Amino acid sequence: MGWLRKMLKGSASSSRIPLDHEEDRDWEEPCDISDEVLDGEREETHYATTLSSADENEADEDQQSDASQSETDDGQYYEISHLEEEDEGLAEALQRSLVFNSNPLCELENIFPPFPFSFHSTDRSRNKELHRPTCYVCKNLIPVDSSGQFQYRSNRFWQQKYCPAHARDGTHRCCSCRRLEPRDMTFSSLTDGRKLCLYCLDSSIMNTDECQPLYREVCEFYENLNMKVYQTIPLYLVERQVLNEVKKSENNGHHLFGEIRGVTMTEGCSINAIVEQSRIRDGNKTKIKTRRYKLVAYSEVVAIIILYGFPRLLTGRILAHEMMHAWLRLEGYPFISPEVEEGLCEVMAHMWLESQISFMSTSHNNHFEKRLAEYLKYDTESRTSHPYGTGFRRANRVIGMYGLKGAIDYIRMTDTFPR
């Protein structure tokens, strides 16, 4: 270190302080050589000692600075690693806080269930094939047209889908509930050609004697409405051919509309009434025994004739309808229009069905009888033919406004419905 050596030399040469301005003196003091040598050795020894001590101090300072720097670096490293650990812990806690609990009620697939099918053409055709309905009659798949649409017909009440071909291929239909005959069931054949399903056959009334309890029940229904029929009117169950002959002999035009299931006779004639039947079905056919009756017109109403073989509910509905015809004749309503008369008769049949439905709701009748009563009520309400359908809606509206007695009293005076 040259700068230190120069500084030490300078300090040694200037160690002697001048007295009385020695620098202005032009003479030199004599000096001893041995003193100079000694002074040089001393100076070199002092310089070496000073240099070694300076080196030691410098080394100590370097060690101390290295130690302090090491301690500082260790502290900084500890602080940095500690902060990194805290940051990592905070990040993990933040990430956990953003994760929802796997609650099945909060999962998106439960809130928004997957669509039942995709909009791809192949998927649509595959799903349509899986949900393709089956024909109620033949149990085959419902046919599809060229555009891929299902081609079927359906009963509005029973909701039974069937192929359109069965409506014109001669498939039998029950004369009571109007359902088609499925391939796995054989309908019972009545003697006049009508078909009856096995469910309707269970409660069917096959002869005149079997119908008498139901006839008395309908008479009590009228009596409870203060519309008692005081005349004893004969009741007969007949085949369709006999009913058609009676219909031709009657001059009342309102009996000529639609399918005829019953007639209230006002003229005398002779009929063959069913008095006995055989429930032993030979090839699903029913055998009957008839007796001929001669009916004489002693009053406005001679007899009530209805088709045999219908189930109890449909037979009672027809009886309630025909009893209203008889009541109007006996009470002096001879000049009312067919729409008014048939409308009142349909309302009475509808009211009787409602009473049966109300009774069956508190009893233990089988399920099909309840459904059949609802179907007959629905059929009465949904008719569109004239005068039955239009007459029922007008009569039902008037009776709802003025009551049964008020509507009948108004019709007695005006022969028509109130406006």
Image (spheres, helix red, strand yellow):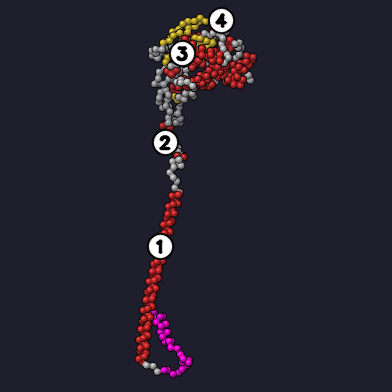
Residue at 39% x, 64% y: name it.
74
Circle number at residue 122: 2
Question: What amino acid is at disc 1?
Answer: Tyr
Could you give the CA–CA distance between mark 1 and mark 2, rounded to whole angstroms?
65 Å
Q: Nearer the viewer, mark 1 or mark 2?
A: 1
Which dot marks residue 326? none
Q: Name the residue that disc number 4 marks.
A: 298
Within 10 angstroms of label 3, few (less than 14), some, or many (20 or more) residues? Answer: many
Q: Quadrant of the N terminus?
A: bottom left
- Report how far apart the C-alphas of labels 4 and 3 lie in the structure: 28 Å
Say which residue label 1 marks. 77
**Label 2 secondary element:** helix
Q: Quadrant of the C terminus?
A: top right
Q: Residues within 10 Å of mark 4 (few under 14, many from 20)?
A: few
Disc ID at residue 205: 3
Residue 179 magenta-highlighted: no
Judging depth in this view, the residue of 284 and 42 nearest the camera is: 42
Q: Foreground mark, 2 or 4?
A: 4
Tell me the SS state at disc 4. Answer: loop
Residue 322 coordinates in the image, percent (x, y) = 54, 13
> Between marks 2 and 4, how big is the CA–CA gap?
76 Å
Expressed as whole percent of the image width and height from the top left, the position of residue 317 reads: 51, 16
Boundaries of the magenta span:
1-29
Tell me: 356 left or right of 47. Answer: right
Who's the residue at 43% across and 41% down the image?
A: 104
Q: Quadrant of residue 255?
A: top right
